[in-house]
Image (tube, rainbow, N blue to C red):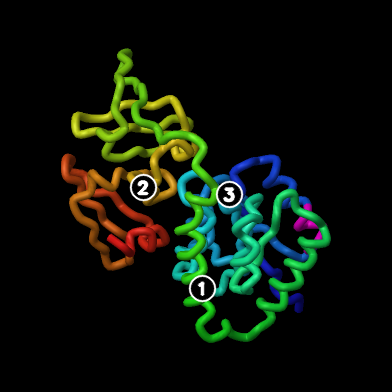
Amino acid sequence: MNAPKTTCVIAEDESLLREALVAALRKAWPDLEILAECADGGSALEAIAELTPDVAFLDIRMPGLTGLEVAASAVAASPRTQVVFVTAYDQYAIDAFDKGAVDYLLKPIQPERLMQTVQRVQSRLAAPTLPAGANESLTALLDQLTAALPRKLGEAAQPLTWLTASIGNATRLIMVDDVLYFRADHKYTTVMTANGEALLRKPIKELLEVLDPSNFKQIHRATVVNLKAIDSISRDDTGRGLIKLKARPEVLTVSQPFMHLFRAM
């Protein structure tokens, strides 16, 4: 009887880099089963929560949720998942990651370094149980890195302040502060304000790259909410969050893995 394969989820928003990582992993770790290849943090978090892979390779900087935020939520959603960060930002990553709570790969990925990472992850997975306090150490490390991320990476562009969206045959200018939430609609995005909805001809993934992350939170793979529009947050019996808005009657659902992002609220 064959032993079960080690499983993984890969999250990298740049398709060429994602394909290169997949190819490198298949060469360095032939028995690894790749369960999902994700292009953004929200999709990665939902994949980890649903598939509970043995290991997750997470790009640190992705639209919507960063790799750090995905990893922090994954501690609760899939505690046994080992995390490997993929980053180009070695100036701040190495000292923290070398403490051993997680592993990291620097872009461009070198085969020798990848093999070291594979061996480390395999060693951790072979342990019968998690070391005492491992998740607490990882959470503390992720909090430290998350606090440093904006300062160290330096956000290049100013957040979006207004957008143009369609209402029927008309085009309307909407201030971003007036948006209550965004919802993915195939290749487009529905923009919801207190006055009704409009259609933005841009996928939500691209929108996440220009929204101010201090004001807008992804609460589901397909939904982003303006924190200023929230009246209250509660949980249902399944652990999902329920968001009541100040200016509209509908209730927004927060996928259970995303509830971790609201722990400070």
1 or 3: tag closer to the N-terminus: 3
- Screen quadrant of the C terminus: bottom left
Position in image of residue 49 (x %, y %): 49, 63
Question: Between residues 214 and 258, which one lies in front from this camera angle?
Answer: 214
Q: Can residue 55 be seen in this view?
A: no
Q: Distance between the residues labelled 2 and 3?
A: 23 Å
Question: Magenta residues?
Answer: 24-29
- Contact (CB < 8 A) between labels 1 and 3? no
Q: What residue type is labelled 3?
A: Cys
Residue at 36% x, 61% y is 259
What residue is shown with label 2?
Answer: 214
User: How many other residues sit within 10 Å of disc 3, few (<14), some (14-19) or many (≥20)?
Assistant: many
User: Within the image, what quadrant is residue 84 found in?
Assistant: bottom right
Q: Is residue 177 magenta?
A: no
Position in image of residue 113 (x %, y %): 78, 62
Q: Is residue 201 visible?
A: yes
Q: Residue 224 carries which label?
A: none
Position in image of residue 232 (x %, y %): 20, 55
Question: Between residues 240 and 150, which one lies in front from this camera angle?
Answer: 150
Q: In this view, does 25 lie to the left or right of 224?
A: right
Question: Between residues 150 and 45, which one lies in front from this camera angle?
Answer: 150
Q: Is mark 2 on a helix, strand or loop?
A: loop
